[in-house]
Amino acid sequence: MTVNPAMDRAFRRQLQQQVDALAATVSLKPNSTCVASAIDDARRAVAAAWVYTSCVVVWAEDHDLVRPLLRRSPTGLVRTPASGALWLGRAFEQLAVHPGTQWLIHPAYQPALWAGLPSPAACTRLIDWWANQAPSLAYPATDTTPGSISGWPVGDLLPVLHDHLRAGNALVQTPSWVADLILDLSLIPAVDSFRDEHLVRTIDPACGTGHFLIRAIDYLWQWWTTGTLSSRSTSGRPPVIGGPARSPVEAARRILASVDGVDIDPLTAAVARFRSTIYIGHLLADSGVLPRPLRLEHIPHTITPRIAVGDALLLGRIPRSQYRRVHPHLADLPGAMFPCEEFTWPPEPEPNPDPDRPPADDCPR
């Protein structure tokens, strides 16, 4: 397959069928909390989380980033029908070996993954489908589209399987050519104007699964390793030239210090962190800094992209108590500002000196 399989309608239907099959077997955990309150919806949310996470694992397997536990069983490991759920769990654990990718299966970021358990037999059927019928999630880059190592199918499949993200957060994936067009008209002129600065700072305040972040990484990688930056989606524009070419290690360091993102949904931000971590590792491997095949566990832990979880309009602008009233589920989210340990909340307002006068509510609505 040479195009993004996430865009293929037949493949999407097959994934939905896998969700339906798992949902019918899900046993919810006592006192579990899911995105939906109805039992059927809760079971479907659990099934969607398991199927989506299996998509991410298979994508990683197709790029040799982790052991092939779902595409095929490694020599010496025996899988039985009764061990299907445990086998999937073992495969999922491989995604958490790096500090930048651990959030994908964190209970606070993907609670539905921990809210219930599909039957072992249903999990085994899902594994067999990936091993024997499902298409590859790997495809090469073209002159106009990024390759699958960019994580594009991982990003595009998230709203396909997690319906609440598309409906509740309006998560709509940006085509690569649109991202390139906008970066051609914004980032390239910025690079030209600030060519003498140490960093070209960028931020996507609603980064979603990271489509713009990945393309911005690509643009800045070209600039800082070659001293030249070419347009990707617009024709007739001369390239920006004359920049100081840096080593791949220095280029990666500058990208990590200058390409930032924020998203209000924890799981969506986790996907963006996952993709950015691996893509920077891939660029370093292509340059000979990291060995091939690139393994997720061998990507240095210093490669930790700055992608926050929060409301980009309010985060860092109002005190924590006010932020908690607007977003109670985000105020205490683990790793919300990962890896920015220096983040501090604005000071809390002074106590009201007049007890008969209600305090002003400065919290934006």
Image (cartoon, rainbow, N blue to C red):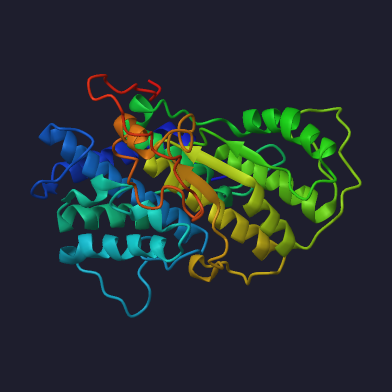
Query: Which residue appears farthest toward the front when viewing the image?
Result: 354
Residue at image x 38%, y 25%?
363
Q: Position of residue 348 (x, y in %)?
A: 38, 38
- In the rendered structure, the answer to whether residue 307 lies left or right of residue 80 reads right
Is residue 154 visible from the viewing direction of this image? no
Q: Position of residue 159 (x, y in %)?
A: 39, 34
Question: Where is residue 237, by image quadrant?
Answer: top right
Q: Position of residue 236 (x, y in %)?
A: 86, 27
- In the rendered structure, the answer to whether residue 141 lies left or right of residue 226 reads left
Placement of 84 over or under 144, stated as above or below = below
Pick the residue in front: 324 or 66.
Answer: 324
Residue at image x 28%, y 42%?
48
Pick the residue in front: 18 or 359.
Answer: 359
Is residue 322 visible from the viewing direction of this image? yes
- In the rendered structure, the answer to whether residue 282 lies left or right of residue 19 reads right
Pick the residue in front: 339 or 288.
Answer: 339
Placement of 361 over or under 310, stated as above or below = above
Query: Which residue appears farthest toward the bottom when viewing the image?
Result: 76
- In the rendered structure, the answer to whether residue 280 lies left or right of residue 97 reads right
Q: Position of residue 216 (x, y in %)?
A: 66, 42
Query: Which residue appears farthest toward the left when viewing the image?
Result: 30
Residue at image x 12%, y 47%?
28
Question: Where is residue 285, by image quadrant?
Answer: bottom right
Quarter holding the C terminus?
A: top left
Pick the residue in front: 171 or 190.
Answer: 190
Figure label count: 0
